[in-house]
Amino acid sequence: MVIAVTESNNVYALHADTGTAIWQRTDIGTPAPQGACPGNIIPVGITGTPVVDLGSRSLFFDAVINGNPVKHFIFSLNVDTGATNAGWPVDVDATAQFNGVNFDSFWQEERGALALVNGIVYVSYSGYVGDCGPYHGWVVGVDINTPSNVMAWATDAEGGGIWGHGGVASDGTNMFVVTGNTFTSPGDLWSGGEAIVRFTAGPVFDDFWAPLNWQTLDNQDADLGGCSPTLIDVPGANPSQLVLALGKDRNAYLLDRNNLGGVHAAVATMNVSSSTLRGTSSAAYKTGEGTHFAFHNDSGELRSYIINATSPPTIALAWNVNDGGRSSPWVTTTDGTNNAIVWVAGVEDDGKLHGYNGDDGAVVFAGGGPNEIMSGTRQWNTGMVARGRIYFGADDKIYAFKVPTGTPTPTPTATPIATATPTPTATPTPPVTPTPPATPTPPATPTPTSSPSPSVSPTSTPRATPRPRPTRRPRPSPPPRP
């Protein structure tokens, strides 16, 4: 099945071949009409990509539910039936605390994909567009077998949001996030922002890296955390186990993910873009030429860079093509290395699927005809590949593209031959119940009304005495609390 979630807090399980709804939940709770600033996602419901634990047959996601106050809840549903699992949802406001700071859903937005690592589901949080209010960068971990066991980490300084929609990355043992700008004063020590942060299970803070000019990036609002971390292994390089961060300053930073080491120069740094890097994720892949990472920038360029297996590793441009839109790329191969194709969608552009040769950027698939055009595409969505199909989520519908297969031969011992240049044909699935699409033009300051919340009994959590904080840069006046 394909799982689809919406900003209207609806959840759908669709048959992967036909698009027919297997089950659906439209009773999760009323989404918030908009965010605190109000933000650029309207309404605010389920934003981050869910994660499935096949062992327990459970689906996990974060939902914003309107009320007085607005709250984030982490849900777990039976992936086969859609029923809410016992002990869930988890009230994040009531359970997440770190170093005297309590989680406050009014200021926190959840954009990143969830991660499930060794029985703990991890959810990352940022603020709303405009750096509105006293938000922090948060990572919350919930034990999936004992959901009352909740741990959390937050940036010491205000700000430091984890904005990238890839969310939490993991190598199977440790978790990684990239944080954005914090609000600091000259001479302040590093306090969580502009960094790659590594966690052990929990999350428990373990190590970090920040560039030498982290405070300059703070002052320029030049977030590292606009894109999520990408973990890359480069055999033969020293170090070989790397983590990549792409910043608004147009630089790519490579770090030894086993030894981040605090504030210092990166293992490798290179200006890799002609425009801002934010709101998209990179994709790593291997070819016969070596290990690549590819990304889309704000000016419609799709670029691929190769990481040279040297000591230390270096970065070099492999290819660059002009491709409209702002889609995050994804990659297919026939065996993990050969016939790599870098795919992107013409998000907020031509609405077409595009495929490029992973070695040299040559066009493999140019988007097809009128029947292959997608409508209502959004920058925050990324394609997914499963069993010979590509799936892409757009406003109110999921698109499925199928790689054509040849006519079977009558030979009983026939062996399927993988094709290096598939030409997908779109197979639109039946649309799900329409939900209000996001709009880039925020309406007037909201006056949220109270509405039913999920079947939990939220209790207020006493707030710790606030610590003195440095004077921040002026921000927009926040709206009144609901």
Image (cartoon, grey):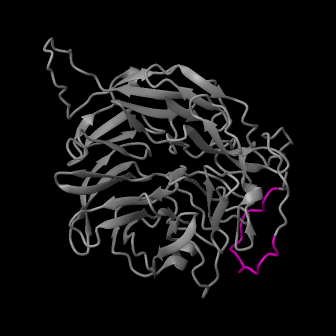
Magenta span contains residue 474 = yes
Q: Quadrant of residue 273?
A: bottom left
Please state the extent of the stretch shown in magenta in the rendering.
464-479
Q: Position of residue 87 (x, y in %)?
A: 71, 45
Decide: is 127 above or below 12.
below
Q: Quadrant of residue 170?
A: bottom left
- In the rendered view, does 194 fall on the left or right side of 467? left
Q: Position of residue 294 (x, y in %)?
A: 33, 53
- In the rendered view, does 87 fall on the left or right side of 408? right
Camera-nearest residue between 438 and 189: 189
Magenta span contains residue 283 = no
Residue in the picture at 42% in, 27% down = 400
Residue in the picture at 48% in, 63% down = 176
Q: Position of residue 387 (x, y in %)?
A: 35, 31
Q: Quadrant of residue 132?
A: bottom right
Q: Position of residue 51 (x, y in %)?
A: 53, 44
- Residue placed farthest to the bottom in the image? 187
- In the rendered view, does 417 fall on the left or right side of 91? left
- Residue placed farthest to the top in the image? 410
Q: Report whether residue 207 is seen.
A: yes
Label count reads 0
Q: Report whether residue 351 is seen.
A: no
Residue in the picture at 21% in, 41% down = 339
Residue in the picture at 80% in, 44% down = 456
Q: Main secondary structure of the magenta part?
A: loop
